[in-house]
Amino acid sequence: MVKVIGLNSGSSFDGVDVVLVEIENGADGYPKRPKFIAGNSYDWPKPVADMVLRAFENKISLFELNRLNYLAGAVYAESARSFMRAQNLKPGDVEVIGFDGQTIYQEPPVHSLLRNYDDSEDLVSRWLDGPYPCGLQIGEPSIVAVACETPVVTQFRPMEHALGGTGAPLMQYLDYVAFRDIGPILTLNIGGIANCHRADADRSKMMAFDTGPGNVMIDHVMRAKFNKPYDKNGDVARSGKVDEKLMGFLKEHDFFKRPVPRSAWRLDFGSRYADKVMADYKHLSDKDLVATVTEFAAYAITRSITDNVKSIGEISTIMASGGGTRNGYLMERLAAYMPRGLRLTLSDEFGVPAAFKEAIKFATLAHATVNHLANNIPAASGAVNFAILGKLVLPPRMAKV
């Protein structure tokens, strides 16, 4: 059994979560369910956070993005180092630190075109003219390796992209190793963007896809209308009234027409889209706007599940995690939309704290990487093969001089 650290800052962009877990491999060679030891969250320094928010909107220069990559790496490093000191962890106590970096941009594959795309002799055309995916995660891992004197694995998505996979979501590997003994089961992560996964001992039956907005539109409206980062417990939404005309407009979003596996990002439901909604429906009260986008988040999650999980009748439990689970009203509305017979619960029930599951995911992925274990699920992502995701950076203490 080894100790592993995972870090995460997701599409909600509400801080850096850091966890310490213990991982032991099972008889089949794959990790058993990680054992959560401790976790904490650290704020992004405001000057850096402001730059990241502008980067989401493509409003910084290439030169600024270069420096931001190092700044983000320093934020991750400071978070991990502070956490290690709090836990009395020394270099060598931790097998590896895993984090993906802050996603700035992602472009999913066009699966309908990939099926008939012949690029066997021309790799360049895959991205010059073709339908292959790409993305950018920032946070220079060398800074983390130096500050923590610990091996680091980061940037898990590019290998998936090279294999034609979505690269997002990435939760399915943790779901496989953690819940393969109790599947089939659905898991739901509600971050800025929400995603759903079917966990199964048979990896060929697994699924993973983004369902649409989780917190991203709610948080944006709250910042714009109430100068608050989020709707605490959903109290504002609870006090408002859902506008059916706006709901009708939101339900027609092109996102729902994309086949799974699919991924979403802020270009789908981010500030530009939310600003247009607020401008077009400015006659609505601020509370009604929050109530409606909260209702839409619950609707989008459930619609995506019922539209795409064909074997839902054999599944009895959906296990939720992520920051959205703290929004009590959103969870109530989600439960109201869920199909009969599908029980909604939190991942805490199974020993995986809902607030830290995404960070636990990156710890588990990193452990698999350094142990040369395939840590993707091709059936869930559309990748053409199993692979080892992640890039390894070794600390200075491991250099042979």
Image (cartoon, rainbow, N blue to C red):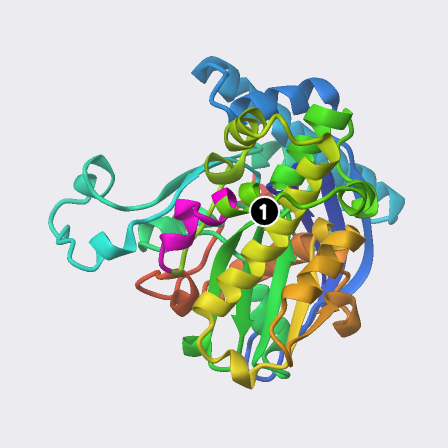
Indicate whether 183 appears above or below 357: below
Q: Quadrant of the C terminus?
A: top right
Is the N terminus in the top left, top right, bottom left or bottom right quadrant?
Answer: bottom right
* Quarter residue 84 falls in: top right
Q: Tell me if residue 8 can be seen.
A: no
Residue 151 in the image: x percent, y percent?
Answer: 62, 47
Q: Say if 99 sits above or below 274 in the image.
A: below
- Seen from the viewer's position, the closer of residues 172 and 230 is 230
Assess whether residue 192 is covered by the magenta stretch.
no
Which SS type dominates the magenta stretch?
helix
**Could you tell me which residue is drawn at 51 percent across and 36 percent down?**
266
> How many badges with numbers are in the image?
1
Q: Nearer the viewer, residue 29 or 214?
A: 214
**In the shown orientation, is residue 363 left or right of residue 230?**
left
Residue 261 appears in the picture as rendered: yes
Q: Residue at x 69, y 65 (%)?
A: 336
Residue at coordinates 33% horizontally, 65% vertically from top-left?
385
**x, y percentage for residue 83?**
81, 43
Residue at the image point whose x is 69% and y is 53% from the top: 322
Residue type pointed to by label 1: Glu
Q: Which residue is mark 1?
A: 244
Whether 381 is drawn above or below 137: the answer is below
Q: Position of residue 18 (x, y in %)?
A: 74, 47
Q: Which residues are magenta?
A: 249-259
Q: Is residue 139 above or below residue 36?
A: above
- Residue 109 falls left or right of residue 20: left
Q: Kindly state the secondary structure of the residue where label 1 is placed.
A: helix
User: Could you classify mark 1 by the number of other residues whose Cα lies within 10 Å: few (under 14), some (14-19), or many (20 or more)?
Assistant: few
Foreground of the two, 35 or 329: 329
